[in-house]
Image (cartoon, rainbow, N blue to C red):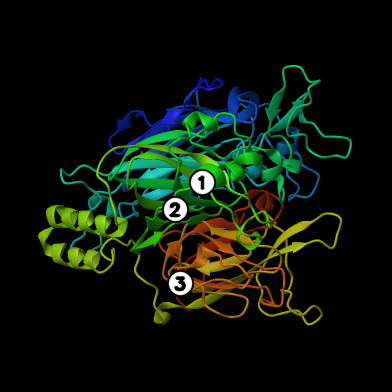
């Protein structure tokens, strides 16, 4: 076990801090055999400087760690590989998995499961990335992911995805990184993998850090059930009268606006609370950051810690005191870093920033250089209400610390990075494209020879899809719904026509293989991260509630009265998950509605899959739709769906 005692240093974690110690590979195959079980373990609680005993569902098997059981093993592959994951559901029997008489959008079947490879471009059917399967307790099933040889390299992840229990299981830690490594240099006829550029002078890849950011929202258990106070509120901390307290995730009452802050828990990184990383000044590192939490926004920045403050000061820091701690001790200027990929897909140009907003499901690849030695705070900085899932302004929290050893002092990180990448290109890029790559890097760090997808031109678009997220609060049972709006209701101006909660037996969108759609995304109540399986999309524009495009590199999104940086520079970027913002109407923003326009191609794969809100408790309660990609009929139409 990772043992922390009062005054002891925090857990130190280094390169690839999730277990990746190679299970055997046979040719181009990767095998994982995972038992799904209840695991009794402990998570460190800085508020008490001790461990909380937790009873959580987890994976046990290939490459899992007994000391960090609440993060799934990293799967590392290359394009063309086959990954086989055998899930052995050994959780106790759950009658609601076999017979559920209530609404399908009432969370249920907490011990049923399945698996989703988030962001992979593979088949959604059969035993591939099929989230419409249900693996009940006592059942074993093998997923087989055949990754095409032309799949983009990048940062992806995987997690449980059974409708009705997704949030509860992901919040228990049932999620892990899936890293697609690439060794294809660019050529005259094709783009290459950014991995082939990110090398030092000796040809060694830059140090990588894989960070799975999780929000394990455990509360006090009594006889296996979540305890509540006399007013029906979740008891996050067990009363002193409870002997040998045990904590778990067993109720959807544990999720909701503000619940993460109320819980007093810390975002864990690779299963560790407040880890300490070690680095060296002047070294370029690739941080692969994965928001594998259920619902709360993370806004990442780095600031230097005062030299007089010891790392052990974090050992007893309560979450509610973190903002004060950061204000008093993490006083250095925020250091700039360079985002090179979003959701696993390389950008056409590096984006220099001091803050990245990660919504649930997002991934960010960044090149990070610590300019000199010392300790640095890794901070989830404050976010305004309109920018966060909680719908309230969030205070700052600590995620961890980086201990930076002496090395090369860097005064201008942007120019330093440009110089190093140009040197790498001159040494390692093929002669046929070397000059092009160098010219791009000199032009403010462009990566046009490394992007995996070509821009979608106006002339390619063959159709249009429209989607609105909607929360119906007019009844005692709140409904989380999605609408295919084709116009606005005459009786309720501004409301989409016929929003509906999820129905597993209904296909909401029938789309044609080879088609190219332009999607218009909106939300009528609160904000939601939109995620669609299989095919990623390219951002065309993001209009604020006053009709201004806030996705341009120099745009400022201040319709709410405070600047929100998360959309700036996203024009033209490819993603698979995207925040759909909605404001409470104000004088500055009388409508409050943002309109997002994205485009996507339906390539190679047919079959049924889903789109949904990636606030996972919203998805479990109905904010999801079935999508079916079908063959064209040769007459300008499509072949009828073979829906189950």
Q: Are marks 1 and 3 in contact (CB under 8 Å)?
A: no
Looking at the image, the residue that sits furthest to the top is 243
Numbered tag placed on residue 379 in the rendering: 1
Q: Left or right of 327: which side holds 409? A: left
User: Label 3, on which residue?
Assistant: 515
Determine crowd level at label 2: few under 14, some 14-19, many 20+ residues with C-alpha closer than 10 A.
Answer: some
Secondary structure state at the residue bearing disc 3: loop
Q: Is residue 73 visible?
A: no
Give the Cα separation between the discs numbered 1 and 3.
42 Å
Between label 1 and label 3, give the one nearer the viewer.
1
Q: Position of residue 30 (x, y in %)?
A: 36, 35
Number of marks in picture:
3
On screen, residue 49 above or below 550: above
In terms of sequence position, does the residue under pointer 1 or pointer 3 come before the other? 1
> Considering depth in this image, is 587 or 198 the residue closer to the camera?
587
The quadrant in which residue 43 appears is top right
């Amino acid at each position: 076990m990772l043992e922390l005692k009062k005054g002891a240093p925090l857990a130190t974690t280094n390169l690839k801090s999730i277990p990746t110690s190679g299970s055997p590979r046979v040719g181009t195959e990767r095998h994982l055999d995972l038992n799904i079980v209840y695991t009794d373990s402990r998570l460190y609680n800085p508020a008490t400087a001790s461990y909380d005993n937790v009873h959580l569902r987890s994976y046990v098997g290939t490459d899992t760690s007994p000391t960090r059981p609440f993060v799934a093993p990293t799967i590392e592959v290359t394009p063309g590989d086959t990954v086989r994951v055998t899930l052995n559901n050994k959780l106790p029997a759950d009658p609601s998995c076999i017979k559920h008489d209530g609404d399908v959008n009432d969370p249920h079947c907490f011990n049923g499961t399945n698996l989703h490879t988030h962001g992979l471009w593979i088949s959604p059917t059969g035993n591939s990335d099929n989230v419409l399967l249900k693996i009940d307790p006592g059942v074993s099933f093998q997923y087989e992911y055949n990754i095409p040889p032309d799949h983009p390299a990048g940062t992806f992840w995987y997690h449980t995805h059974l409708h009705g229990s997704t949030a509860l299981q992901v919040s228990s830690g049932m999620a892990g990184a899936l890293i697609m490594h690439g060794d294809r240099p660019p050529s005259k006829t094709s783009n290459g993998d950014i991995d082939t550029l990110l090398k030092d002078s000796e040809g060694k890849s830059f140090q990588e850090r894989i960070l799975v950011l999780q929000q394990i929202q455990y509360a006090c258990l009594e006889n296996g059930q979540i305890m509540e106070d006399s007013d029906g509120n979740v008891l996050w901390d067990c009363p002193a009268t409870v002997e040998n307290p045990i904590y778990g995730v067993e109720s959807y009452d544990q999720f909701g606006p503000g619940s993460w802050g109320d819980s007093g828990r810390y975002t864990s990184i690779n299963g560790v609370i407040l880890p300490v990383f070690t680095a060296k000044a002047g070294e370029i590192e690739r941080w692969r950051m994965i928001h594998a939490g259920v619902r709360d926004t993370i806004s990442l920045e780095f600031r230097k810690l005062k030299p007089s403050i010891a790392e052990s000061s974090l050992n007893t820091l309560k979450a509610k005191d973190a903002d004060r701690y950061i204000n008093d001790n993490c006083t250095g200027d925020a250091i700039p870093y360079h985002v090179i990929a979003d959701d696993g897909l390389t950008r056409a140009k590096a984006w220099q920033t001091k803050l990245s907003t990660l919504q649930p499901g997002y991934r960010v690849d960044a090149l990070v250089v610590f300019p000199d030695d010392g300790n640095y705070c890794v901070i989830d900085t404050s976010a305004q209400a309109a920018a966060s899932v909680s719908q309230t302004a969030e205070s700052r929290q600590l995620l961890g610390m980086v201990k930076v050893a002496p090395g090369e002092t860097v005064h201008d990180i942007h120019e330093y990075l440009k110089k190093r990448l140009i040197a790498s290109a001159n040494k390692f890029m093929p002669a046929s494209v070397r000059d092009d790559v160098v010219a791009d890097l000199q032009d403010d760090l462009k990566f046009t020879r490394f992007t995996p997808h070509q821009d979608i031109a106006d002339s390619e678009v063959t159709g249009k899809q429209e989607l609105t997220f909607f929360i119906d609060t007019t009844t005692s049972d709140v409904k989380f719904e999605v609408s295919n709006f084709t116009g606005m209701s005459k009786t309720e101006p501004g409301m989409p026509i016929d929003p509906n909660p999820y129905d597993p037996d209904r296909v909401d969108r029938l789309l044609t293989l080879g088609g190219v759609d332009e999607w218009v995304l909106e939300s009528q109540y609160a904000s939601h991260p939109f995620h669609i399986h299989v095919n990623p999309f390219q951002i065309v524009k993001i209009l604020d509630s006053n009709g201004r495009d806030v996705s341009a590199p120099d745009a400022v999104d201040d319709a709410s009265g405070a600047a929100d940086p998360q959309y700036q520079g996203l024009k033209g970027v490819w993603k698979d998950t995207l925040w759909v913002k909605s404001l409470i109407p104000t004088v500055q923003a009388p409508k409050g509605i943002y309109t997002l326009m994205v485009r996507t191609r339906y390539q190679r794969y047919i079959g049924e899959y889903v789109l949904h809100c990636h606030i996972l408790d919203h998805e479990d309660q109905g904010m999801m739709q079935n999508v079916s990609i079908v063959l064209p009929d040769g007459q300008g139409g499509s072949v009828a769906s073979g829906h189950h």
